[in-house]
Amino acid sequence: MRYTLITTGFVAMFTTAALGQGMQMPMGHADIAVSNAWARATAGEGTTGAAYLTLTDSGAADQLTGASTPVAGMAHLHETLNANGVMEMRDVGSIALPTGKAVTLAPGGYHLMLMDLRHALKAGDSFPLTLTFAHAAPVTVQVKVTAAGASAPMGHDMSNMPVMSMPGTKP
């Protein structure tokens, strides 16, 4: 009994410390870590939004294949690219997660497009987002909603974060 309480206390302490550092503990797969999950507040009653995050796979290479959230009717993997001077967004089937390399979904690159929002995303709110992978079990994280014009989650400097560049673009 005493051993169980001590063990439970250490697990709770570790989880709280990890969440306090901006790391979200993955549910169901120890090899994929998700950090800095955030979204911008939507304007008015907007029906679309986007979510951003960083994925680091410490196991065998995998692929992010999709996402779902109760705040949107659909969540699609998208990328933003420059096509002859015109910025375009397009749907992608998956995003490669190479072993040991952080892959950041950020404005102007890969992102999760949230469509048919059930309500506006408001700064200060949060919502669950479940990520699906080609091989790993699904991972659910909490996404923090920041101000509409934010370029990164509040309190997080992303200037040193690696961003996966796309063919035809400059990092």
Image (tube, grey):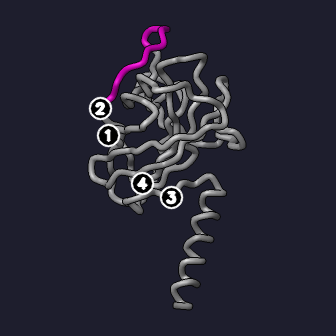
Q: CA distance from mark 2 to mark 3?
A: 25 Å
Element type where label 1 sits in the image: strand
Instruction: Please name the residue shown 52% across and 40% down the image.
Output: 127
Which tag, 2 or 4, sits closer to the chain's start?
Answer: 4
Which tag, 1 or 3, sits closer to the chain's start?
Answer: 3
Tag 1 residue? 65
- Please tell me which residue lies in front, 29 or 48: 48
Using the image, determine if residue 46 lies above or below residue 85: below
Using the image, determine if residue 100 lies above or below residue 90: below
Element type where label 3 sits in the image: loop
Tag 3 residue? 25
Give, as a three-letter code, the residue at label 4. Answer: Asp
Which tag, 2 or 1, sits closer to the chain's start?
Answer: 1
Instruction: Please name the residue shown 27% across and 47% down the image.
Output: 134
- Residue 48: % across, % down: 47, 21
Instruction: Please name the residue shown 72% across and 43% down the image.
Output: 155
Give, as a three-letter code, the residue at label 1. Answer: Thr
Which tag, 2 or 3, sits closer to the chain's start?
Answer: 3
Give, as a three-letter code, the residue at label 2. Answer: Gly
Q: CA distance from mark 1 to mark 3?
A: 19 Å
Mark 1 vs mark 3: give the one in front. Answer: 3
Magenta residues, dominant SS class: strand
Q: Are marks 4 and 3 in contact (CB under 8 Å)?
A: no
Q: CA distance from mark 4 to mark 3?
A: 13 Å
Tag 2 residue? 93
- Residue 145: % across, % down: 60, 35
Q: CA distance from mark 4 to mark 1?
A: 14 Å
Instruction: Tell me the number on the disc at residue 57.
Output: 4
